Amino acid sequence: MATADDHRTYSIRQLCREFGATARALRFYEDKGLLTPARKGQTRVYDARDRARLKLILRGRRIGFSLQEIQEMLDLYDRKDHNAHQMAVALRRHRAQIAALKQQLEDIEGAIQTAEEACQWMEQKLGEHRPDLLPGAEEYASLLRERLNPDHHHQPFKARA
């Protein structure tokens, strides 16, 4: 059963605003055949199908699918028996993408841990041999010189905002 939204049309500006995309991106997706808006003169007119496809494109890009993979899934979306077949293919691809993203996350967490350990080691070595080069050392030395100055009148310490 058709709803009022099925017959609604959208301008490029409306879709860009709704999805946080750029007009350039929508034109790019059109050039690649992922979107097929109608035209009224020079104006692109998007329908509910284009809107749904754009939503799928952006979702696919966000989770790391290539445009080719997105095109294949959209082709399934256009088939008459699209629901079950499309979902099965999309499910397999999404599961594979989840596994890849989890591996990337694990790799990133490992790289962060390695970098943190390297920073701690360098801070320790600098602290032992050249504490003047530690981040914040110059500011600390300046405060220390000020406090050790016999002409300095001790004022209560004020925390910075």
Image: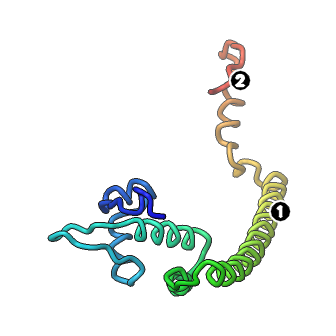
- Residue lying at 80% horizontally and 69% vertically, measured from the top left: 110
Report which residue position mark 2 lands on: 147
Q: Look at mark 1 in the image and give the residue it sits on.
A: 117
Indicate which disc residue 90 carries: none
Mark 2 Cα within 10 Å, few/some/many (few <14, many 20+)? some
Residue under the image location 34 percent in, 82 percent down: 31
Residue 56 rendering spot, x and y as whole percentages: 53, 70
Instruction: Decide if residue 67 is in sight here.
Output: no
Q: Nearer the viewer, residue 76 or 18?
A: 76
Q: Nearer the viewer, mark 1 or mark 2?
A: 1
Left or right of 36 on screen, residue 107: right
Quadrant showing the C terminus? top right
Q: Earlier in the sequence, mark 1 or mark 2?
A: 1
How packed mark 1 is, by other alpha carbons closer than 10 Å (few <14, some 14-19, many 20 or more), is: few
Amino acid of disc 1: Glu
Q: Secondary structure at mark 1?
A: helix
Residue occupying the point 62% across, 81% down: 86
**As drawn, which residue projects farthest toward the front?**
1
Q: Say above or below: 157 vs 31.
A: above
Q: Quadrant of residue 87?
A: bottom right
The Cα atoms of the two marked residues, 1 and 2, are separated by: 34 Å
